Image (spheres, helix red, strand yellow):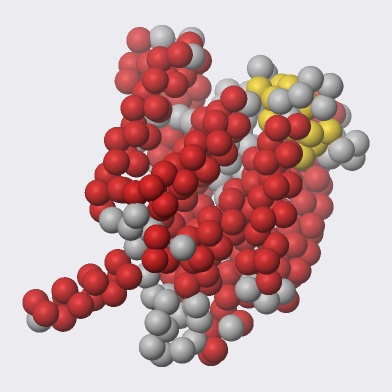
Amino acid sequence: MLLVVGLLAVYSASFAIGHLEYGDTNYFVARQALFALAGLGAMLLFMRMDYRRLRVLSVPMMAVALVSLLAVLIPGIGVERNGAARWLDLGVIDVQPSEFAKLAIIIYISAWLASRRDKINDFSLGFVPFVLMMGLIGGLVVVEPDMGTAIVIILVTSTLFFVAGAPVSHLLLLIVMGALISWGLVLTQEYRLARLDSFLAAESDPQGNGYHILQLLIALGSGGPAGLGWGASRQKFFYVPGAHTDGVFAIIGEELGFIGAMVVIGLFAFLIYRALKVTVKAPDQFGLLLGMGVISWVAYQALINIGGITRTIPLTGIPLPFLSYGGSSLIAVMAAVGVLLSISRHMTERDPSRPDVPRAWTRRASYGRQRA
């Protein structure tokens, strides 16, 4: 349902810019439909594959992800747009490696944590190697620069670290370190300071730093309770930058109103709820961590995108899963759904005792029973 809504939303939000730039109102939706077909193929591939095979493939997948993240930084290989080098030109399509790297990182970290159950609590053998890995991956993404994607990766992997049984003290240390590094990165780049300024005081510069967020809010506010009607958005006519990409939720809110926007959020909530039901029944710890990684990815990215558009948090510029235009993002997230479906197909193999349940969960459950 999200995929279908996304195709309709991309067409409505993009036909004006498609006509202006390419003389074809169907340019973006036709490409998005092809991306959707490729994504369905990736979903079926991962669904049919036993997810436990991914544990063996985790190292080569991670190696490919690191090489591709390095490749975009090499002049002549990486494609630069608007001052950011995030793409590789494959001729027919430009690929954004960081989107596929999210899935590779989730698979690798899940396998790594599942193999180090007895060492997660150890600072030198658990916390330090984890921080070094995340620093390397996050650093490569930040250099592109793409701080939004780096934030998603750090949030997802930190969630997996906690689910795997890491002590709360280590998690708090991660949060403090992440906050300090993020603040330092904001202070070192003028465009990041501009985004923070637009979040705090957009009205003070409506034609400059505040233009983007104010146009998004105008689109949302114009929709009212029931919306202007599908296809009737006014803000998509070159007022909202990236109306068919990062800003597609604002156009949905304008055309379908508060009710339509809440239905879309409800679809995300239902997807996450169903995915959680599957994940907690995974037959082993690797499956549990893998499912939690995919759920966290979709949930965090949706929250950050919608939070930025509604001015709840600073705007970061990351796509809304399933809905925003973009082949790399759509194919990668559909492949991740295939992993969830693979876990679902093996739920009946679950050992009721499951001795490798994360120890932190076991301790919390035991504490709850004692209190009861």
Q: Quadrant of the N terminus?
A: bottom right
Front residue (pair 219, 58): 58
Q: Residue furthest front?
A: 124
Q: Is 5 left, or right, of 67 in this rendering?
A: left
In the shown orientation, is residue 98 left or right of residue 217? right
Image quadrant of residue 349? bottom right
Residue 256 at x, y percent in the picture:
51, 48
Residue at 29% of width from left, 41% of height from top? 173
Residue that appears at 43% across and 57% down = 160
Which residue shows up at 38% across the image and 47% down it?
124
Q: Is residue 85 left or right of residue 262?
A: right
Relative height, residue 76 to residue 276 (above, below)? above
- Left or right placement of residue 18 versus residue 198 in this view: right
Q: Which quadrant of the rendered structure holds the C terminus?
A: bottom left
Can you say whether 163 is above or below 310 in the image?
A: below
Counting from the top left corner in percent of width and height, residue 184 is at 39, 20
Nearer-the-camera pick, 126 or 140 = 126
Query: Residue 277 at x, y = what percent?
Result: 44, 75
Q: Residue at x 34, y 62 (%)?
A: 165
Res. 83 visible in picture? yes
In the rendered image, residue 325, in percent from the top left (x then y), is placed at: 68, 42
Q: Is residue 75 above or below residue 166?
A: above
Q: Nearer the viewer, residue 281 or 3?
A: 281
Q: Is residue 118 above or below residue 16?
A: below
